[in-house]
Amino acid sequence: MKHKIFRHGDVDGREIESIPSTAKLLDTKTVAYGEVTGHHHTFTGQVLVYQPIEGQTIKIDGEDIPVQKYIEVIEDSTLIHQEHNQILVQKGVYAILQEREWNPFEQQIRKVLD
């Protein structure tokens, strides 16, 4: 089975099998806020957003990546941000990860800040 992936600015969504029972349902459709600008990545449509327990990760290419949020997209929904084109995210269950980049000068991976 090929898993769906989406990227929207610094938001990285990876399809997963299910949301852990330890995740807490939130009363929001926003999955990420800009650290500098205050902008936000927010869904329209029928989407449930969950907060993972602290330190929860998923394994991607042999590396444990921290999970920022879990989402259940009940019907195809639009993800919007003030500085990015909107995108359509297909129905499914996803882990939202902080996008990362390799810094060759510091020889380390760091998270991308919005």
Image: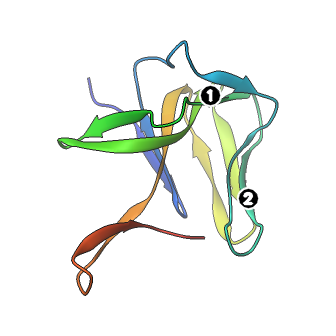
The residue that disc 1 covers is 73
Residue 12, visible in the rendered structure: yes
Figure coloring: rainbow
Tell me the tag on residue 40.
2
- Between discs 1 and 2, the one toward the N terminus: 2
Relative placement, left or right, of 87 versus 20 is: right
Say which element carries label 2: strand
Vertical side of 114 occupied by 54: above or below: above
Relative placement, left or right, of 101 versus 81 is: left
Q: Residues within 10 Å of mark 1 (few under 14, many from 20)?
A: many
Relative depth, front residue between 8 and 23: 23
Q: Residue at x 51, y 19 (%)?
A: 19
Residue lying furthest top in this view? Answer: 21
Relative depth, front residue between 103 and 81: 103
What's under tag 1, amino acid-wise? Val
Q: Quadrant of residue 77?
A: top right
Say which element carries label 1: strand
Vertical side of 8 occupied by 15: above or below: above
Relative placement, left or right, of 86 versus 58 is: right
What's under tag 2, amino acid-wise? His
- Residue 26: x and y, percent? 75, 29
Residue lying furthest bottom in this view? Answer: 105
